[in-house]
């Protein structure tokens, strides 16, 4: 499948997650509906202008749309639409590049692998903990509302 087709599938997933019609997105992108439909169908070549216009229209991350095919995922753009994962990563990377300059050439690939892997593992652990704490809080609240006594910790 071409990158344009994969980006189109990702765009469709984001649009649907946003509960928007093709016409709504086309209007927000200032495109005729048929042109938008060609974009979402992945007809032709990747159009960066359309990707950025789509991202503005749907409040999603344009870089996730563009990089999803490289990650083998049309769902990546939908999954990161709200967190803006790639946009944040690229902004932070740009700041790092500016600070490092030519010292970028001296970076040890092993150190990069370790740093990114540790960071992603920490984010995963923090997310899991946050979700578990949220579920425990909701469960306790539901029990209180239902008149159940709190469980004894022991």
Image (cartoon, grey):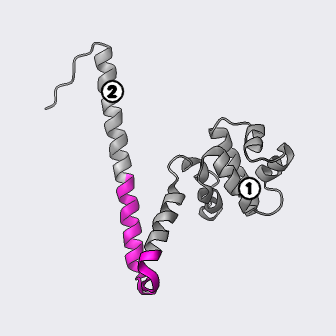
- Indicate left or right for 130 with 90 as reference: left
Image location of residue 137, percent across then percent down: 31, 30
Residue at 63% x, 38% y is: 18
Image location of residue 82, percent across then percent down: 53, 46
Q: CA distance from mark 2 to mark 1?
A: 44 Å
Magenta span dominant secondary structure: helix
Position above or below: 81 against 107: above
- Tell me, yes or no, if residue 1 can be seen here: no
Badge 1: few (under 14), some or many (20 or more) residues near its Cα, within 10 Å?
some
- Indicate left or right for 125 with 82 as reference: left
> Which residue corresponds to mark 1?
50
Q: Please give the range of residues in magenta.
A: 98-124
**Secondary-structure class at tag 1:** helix
> Which residue corresponds to mark 2?
139
Residue at 40% x, 83% y is: 108
Q: Is residue 114 magenta?
A: yes
Residue at 32% x, 14% y is: 146
Q: Are marks 2 and 1 in contact (CB under 8 Å)?
A: no
């Amino acid at each position: 499948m071409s990158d344009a087709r994969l980006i189109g599938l990702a765009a469709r997933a984001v649009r649907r997650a946003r509960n928007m019609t093709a016409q709504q997105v086309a209007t927000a992108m200032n495109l005729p509906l048929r042109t938008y439909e060609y974009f979402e169908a992945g007809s032709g070549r990747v159009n960066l202008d359309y990707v950025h216009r789509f991202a503005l229209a749907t409040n999603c991350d344009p870089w996730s749309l563009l990089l999803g095919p490289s990650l083998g995922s049309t769902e990546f753009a939908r999954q990161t639409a709200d967190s803006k994962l790639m946009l944040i990563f690229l902004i932070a990377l740009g700041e790092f590049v500016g600070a490092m300059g030519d010292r970028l050439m001296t970076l040890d690939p092993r150190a990069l692998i370790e740093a990114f892997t540790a960071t992603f593992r920490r984010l995963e652990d923090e997310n899991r903990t946050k979700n578990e704490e949220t579920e425990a809080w909701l469960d306790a609240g539901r029990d209180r509302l239902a008149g159940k006594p709190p469980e004894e910790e022991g």
